[in-house]
Image (cartoon, rainbow, N blue to C red):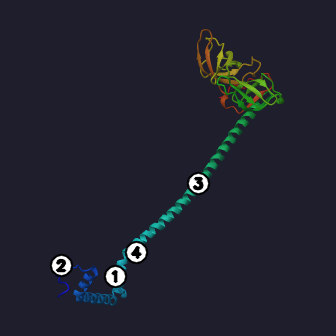
Amino acid sequence: MPRDTLLEIRSPLTARPVPPRVPDGPQVVQAFISRHRPFFILLAVLMGQLLLLSVQVTRDQNVPLAKVWAVSAFAPVERVLRSVADGVAAACIAVRDLGHSERNQRELSARLAADEARIRELSAQGSENARLRALLDFKAQAGYPTVAAEVIGSSPGENSNAILIDKGTDAGLMADLAVVTPDGVAGKIVAVYPHSAQVLLITDPAAGAGALVEQSRVQGVLKGAGRGQCRLDYVMNDSAVSPGDKVLTSGLDRVFPKGLPIGTVVEAADGNIYKNITVQPVAALNRLEEVLVVVSKSSGPEQLNARD
């Protein structure tokens, strides 16, 4: 009886049909190869002949065809791998260059900051030298003895304009001495200590000075108005005073030498009897750093007129 013929066998006891036997997978493959063995042998022979032929056949420049096929098969893979390698190398170079660039940028930033600090320092030194030179020139032209002092403090109050200088009784200073700058009048000393003195600025409401208008020679009393300005009181309505006129010290207060510049008229309007005159000081009272104290109350030469 053939093996692949399935018979239906019944048990004599139960008289039930027995299911057919199913062959295993390897048996099926073995049966298939055995059944088509001539075909597989022919295929193997053809592949061997083709391989031998490709080894023997050459193309241009005596290159074997098999080598040509191998190169053609692996060329795309080689190109991909080479592209990946080139990309990785380029990325590494870019990262290295970026690190160098960041380091160079930090170095340049630090150098720039140092240069800017040096420029600011030199600019401050230049400004200080210019102020000191102007102070020395004014001292030489003043015609009366003065003592140079440095501002070491200022009053924080808005309506109390005062500064503290680094000279006191040790430098021969006393109260009611005039304090001036190369630009004009700053104020007067109101309190003296062994190594410092307090100066009341002319913009303080408690400050006062004898003054006159340079153009018309009209005299009045300068009072502090606060907020960085002064007013010129007791000038009659019929007096010739206009915005832009220069205001000088008159010397009548026996504190400030005559002819020192005080400020410029910014507003002049008629009042009931006297004009309402507002004066802007010419000295930068909010930025004082060095001043001169007039140690003699004698009047100086009047040729010290107002300066632009």
Q: Say whether residue 300 is visible.
A: no
Which residue is at 62% across, 9% downward?
273
The quarter of the displayed image where residue 199 is located: top right
- Location of the C terminus by quadrant is top right
Q: Which residue is mark 2?
A: 13
Tag 1, which secondary structure?
Answer: helix
Query: How far separated are the C-alphas under marks 3 and 1?
Result: 56 Å
Q: Nearer the viewer, mark 2 or mark 1?
A: 2
At x 61%, y 50%, the residue is 112
The part of the image, by quadrant, that contains residue 228 is top right
Q: Which is nearer the N-term, disc 4 or disc 2?
A: 2
- Figure disc tally: 4
- Which callout, 1 or 4, points at the residue further toward the start of the chain? 1
Q: Earlier in the sequence, mark 3 or mark 4?
A: 4
Q: Position of residue 109 (x, y in %)?
A: 59, 51
State the separation of the CA atoms marked 2 and 1.
70 Å
Q: Give the x, y percent position of residue 240.
A: 62, 15
Q: In whole angstroms, how far apart are the C-alphas of marks 4 and 2?
A: 73 Å
Residue that lies at the very extreme toward the front in this rendered image: 13
Q: Of 110 and 118, which appears nearest the observer?
A: 110
Question: Is 107 on the left or on the right of 63, as rendered?
Answer: right
User: Which comes sooner in the sequence, label 2 or label 1?
Assistant: 2
Name the foreground residue: 23 vs 106: 23
- Answer few, some or many: residues within 10 Å of disc 3's Cα (few below 14, many 20 plus, some between 14 and 19): few
Give the alpha-carbon distance from disc 1 to disc 4, as whole Å.
14 Å
Query: Which residue matches tag 1?
Result: 69
Q: Residue at label 4?
A: 78
Kindly state the secondary structure of the residue where label 4 is placed: helix
Secondary structure type for disc 2: loop
Q: Which amino acid is tagged 2?
A: Leu
Pointer 3: what residue?
Answer: 106
